[in-house]
Image (cartoon, rainbow, N blue to C red):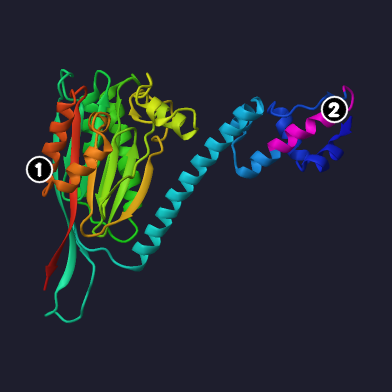
């Protein structure tokens, strides 16, 4: 047997940490002296102790470490890989937010739907501005008896929400309504992040209000807010946002679904994911249910900042479109339709031509340059 001091030096976990992990039943000593309470460890426990120490250095929460420690090597490796993928995604999101803050704290924002891309002290010279031109369309589809989607395109706000459950339509409408105040809200430097946080919390409370006590009612939400030079993205669920830029189509959201998590972990192939029976099962959404006091926080959404370029075209859509229309077809339609209104009509028609098994909603927004003296 090894004393707690010797074991601590060997595994590089402090005696204080070892005592905590004993209390949490994460790493129990092999023997505890009944009279002194002194802990003793077996040499064969060193490998697990070192694993715990390494996982703590990765920043893995203790609850997850307990689960990983109970797995075999292959399963443990897969869980660690999945954890690190989440860390990298969160780090990338924070990097975008930091870049946004630096940018917006060092230069003023332009007014609604416009941005100075060049300035001059000479009033006779032209100034290039950016603005959005948008269109939206929502359709019941060919199978569902009612439309539970909500799609919106305003002066600053673009949003698609896909409701589910018996009150799905009011839930999606309430979530989008909670963002509409940003259409008229001034966006001074650095404030958009706080405004987005307020809007998400407001959407959560609004959905809980209309959904009542059941958590079987809720909605996804994918929204973008135009600052004048950037689009701030807020995303939760499996509605999607795409960017068409320089001839390429890029999905800029990550589905919060069971199937997507299995894809991330390498447990499914993309082909298997398309026919998986749980492909619509969400890991995150805005749902009903009355939280305990104090109220639970809103589910953490993905938040990203995208610098706008003239010629960009954005698509926000519910899974009624993305589940039945291939990305190749989305790209072709977005590339060839000259105006956003034509693009949304063609996309909805394509979903219905593929059977229209779900409600289908989309918003298409073009970033265009204009000139002013």
Q: Quadrant of residue 298?
A: top left
Highlighted range, magenta: 34-52
Task: Tell me what residue is drawn at x 17 percent, y 44 percent.
Answer: 153
Is 248 situated left or right of 57 in this image? left
Is 211 situated left or right of 356 in this image? right
Q: Is residue 165 visible?
A: yes
Point out residue 56 in the picture as x, y percentages from the top left corner: 65, 41
Task: Tell me what residue is drawn at x 21 percent, y 26 percent.
Answer: 170
Q: Quadrant of residue 148?
A: top left
Point out residue 55 in the picture as x, y percentages from the top left corner: 64, 39
Give the residue number, with chain letter if any, for mark 2: 37
The answer for how far apart the CA atoms under marks 1 and 2 are is 76 Å
Give the residue number, with chain letter if any, for mark 1: 342
Q: 227 above or below 177?
A: below
Label 1 element class:
helix
Q: Is residue 178 visible?
A: no
Is 226 situated left or right of 287 in this image? left
Task: Tell me what residue is drawn at x 40 percent, y 25 percent.
Answer: 272
Q: 227 above or below 200?
A: below
Name the one closer to the observer, 157 or 178.
157
Q: 283 above or below 112?
A: above
Q: Quadrant of residue 310?
A: bottom left
The quadrant the C terminus occupies is bottom left
The quadrant the N terminus occupies is top right
Q: Is residue 42 magenta?
A: yes
Label 2 element class:
loop
- Mark 1 or 2, which is nearer the eye? 1
Point out residue 145 in the picture as x, y percentages from the top left corner: 15, 17
């Amino acid at each position: 047997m090894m004393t707690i001091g010797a074991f601590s030096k060997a595994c590089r976990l402090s005696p204080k940490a070892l005592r905590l992990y004993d209390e949490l039943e994460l790493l129990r000593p092999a023997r505890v002296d009944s009279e002194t309470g002194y802990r003793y460890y077996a040499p064969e426990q060193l490998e697990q102790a070192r694993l715990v120490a390494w996982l703590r250095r990765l920043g893995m929460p203790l609850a997850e470490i307990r689960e990983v420690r109970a797995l075999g090597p292959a399963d443990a490796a897969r869980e660690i890989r999945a954890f690190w993928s989440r860390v990298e995604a969160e780090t990338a999101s924070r990097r975008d937010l930091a870049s946004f803050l630096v940018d917006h704290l060092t230069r003023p924002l332009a007014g609604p739907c416009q941005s100075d891309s060049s300035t001059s002290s000479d009033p006779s010279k032209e100034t290039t501005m950016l603005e959005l031109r948008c269109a939206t369309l929502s359709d019941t589809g060919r199978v569902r008896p009612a439309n539970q989607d909500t799609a919106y395109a305003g002066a600053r706000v673009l949003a698609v929400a896909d409701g589910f459950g018996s009150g799905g339509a009011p839930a999606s409408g309430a979530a989008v309504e909670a963002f509409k105040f940003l259409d008229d809200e001034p966006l001074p430097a650095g404030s958009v992040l706080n405004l987005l946080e307020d809007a998400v919390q407001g959407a959560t409370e609004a959905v809980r209000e209309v959904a009542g006590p059941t958590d079987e009612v809720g909605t996804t939400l994918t929204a973008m807010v135009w600052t004048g030079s950037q689009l701030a993205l807020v995303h939760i669920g499996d509605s999607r946002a795409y960017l068409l830029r320089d001839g390429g189509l890029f999905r800029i959201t990550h589905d919060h679904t069971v199937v997507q998590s299995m894809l991330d972990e390498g447990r499914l192939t993309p082909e298997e994911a398309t026919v998986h029976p749980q492909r619509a099962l969400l890991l995150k959404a805005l749902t009903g249910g009355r939280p305990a006091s104090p109220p639970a926080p809103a589910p953490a959404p993905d938040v990203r900042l995208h610098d706008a370029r003239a010629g960009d075209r954005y698509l926000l859509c519910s899974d009624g479109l993305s589940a039945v229309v291939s990305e190749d077809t989305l790209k072709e339609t977005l590339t060839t339709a000259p105006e956003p209104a034509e693009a949304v009509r063609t996309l909805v028609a394509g979903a219905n031509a593929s059977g229209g098994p779900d409600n289908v909603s989309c918003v298409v927004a073009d970033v265009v340059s204009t000139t002013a003296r």
